[in-house]
Amino acid sequence: MATVHSLAAVALLAILCSHGTLASDADLLQDFCVVDKTSQGRLHANGFPCKDAKDVIADDFFFSGLHMAGNTTNKQGSNVTNVNVAQVPGLNTMGISLARVDYASNGLNTPHTHPRATEILTVLEGSLYVGFVTSNPESKLFAKVLNKGDVFVFPQGLIHFQFNHGTSNAVALVALSSQNPGVITVGNAVFGSKPSILDGILAKAFQVDKNIIDRIQAQF
Ligand SMILES: *[C@@H]1O[C@H](CO)[C@@H](O)[C@H](O)[C@H]1NC(C)=O
Ligand SMILES: *[C@@H]1O[C@H](CO)[C@@H](O)[C@H](O)[C@H]1NC(C)=O
């Protein structure tokens, strides 16, 4: 009897997995659902409403420019060039997207999370120190130095970062399991929200004086 039950459990799990229940975006019900930009604001959907298929063109599935480096002359020394549903309307409902990340020497893609996607990163140039932290109560850091050709995975929703510890520029190509992965940058969310979170609340959360919080908030 126990065997029958465990077989049934395995079969159920297989069905759930094959139907994408554990994936981040829903299964497709048609070949594609290219974003209809004209209906935005009038029609609300979980994702974007679709264009009439007869109006869809090849360029709806096209993007050009990932050969070009983003400008890394900024405080963090990094730049993300996104290729998601905002840039490629044909990605709507496809559950996948891309980004190019450029890093100056000492450049950092600051700790952030993608609420809707797992990320897989490939180093194209240079060397990166990367990592992610698991959820409570362990909060365990998994970190590694990556070189050209190396690949690393950042599981969905977990806070992660990439740092170019090398003396030359670094470039990575990342793929994400959502057409609209979203980004929550920890520093911006906690210290740069609009309006600000009360400094007394952050002082208690981080166990420091309010003036330290005020100084950090002033950076955002
Ligand atoms: C990233 O690079 C692009 C292209 O050079 C530039 O327009 C954009 O301002 C840069 N973003 C940041 C945050 O520096
Ligand atoms: C990169 O950004 C910096 C700061 O905004 C700007 O001064 C510089 O001209 C930009 N470089 C290029 C190549 O666009």
Image (tube, grey):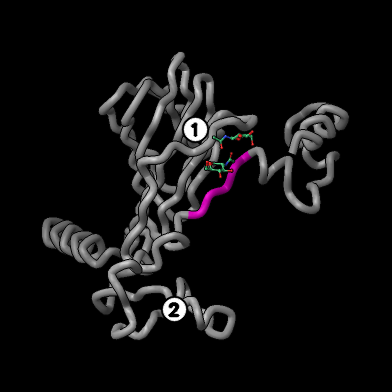
Disc number for residue 211: none
Residue at the spot of label 2: 36
Label 1–label 2 contact, CB within 8 A: no
> What residue lies at 35% left-to-right and 68% top-to-bottom?
60
Residue 156 percent coordinates (x, y): 42, 47
Give the residue furthest to the right.
Answer: 211
Viewer-proximal residue, 121 or 59? 59
> What residue lies at 38% left-to-right and 81% top-to-bottom?
51
Residue at the spot of label 1: 161
Please state if 127 lies on the left or on the right of 193 as rendered: left
Ligand 1 within 8 angstroms of badge 1 C-beta: no
Quarter that holds the C terminus: top right
Quarter that holds the N terminus: bottom left
Residue 88 percent coordinates (x, y): 39, 62
Q: Pointer 1: residues within 10 angstroms few (<14), some, or many (20+)? A: some
Residue 205 percent coordinates (x, y): 74, 36
Kind of residue indicated by mark 2: Asp
Q: Which numbered disc, 1 or 2, marks the residue closer to the eye?
A: 2
Residue 131 forms part of the magenta stretch: no
Is 50 drawn above or below residue 69 in the view shown?
below
Kind of residue indicated by mark 1: Phe
> What residue lies at 29% left-to-right and 85% top-to-bottom?
54
Give the residue furthest to the top.
Answer: 167
> What residue lies at 42% left-to-right and 74% top-to-bottom?
35
- In terms of sequence position, does the residue under pointer 1 or pointer 2 come before the other? 2
Say how many tags the image has: 2
- Ligand 1 image-quadrant field: top right
The residue range painted magenta reads: 182-186
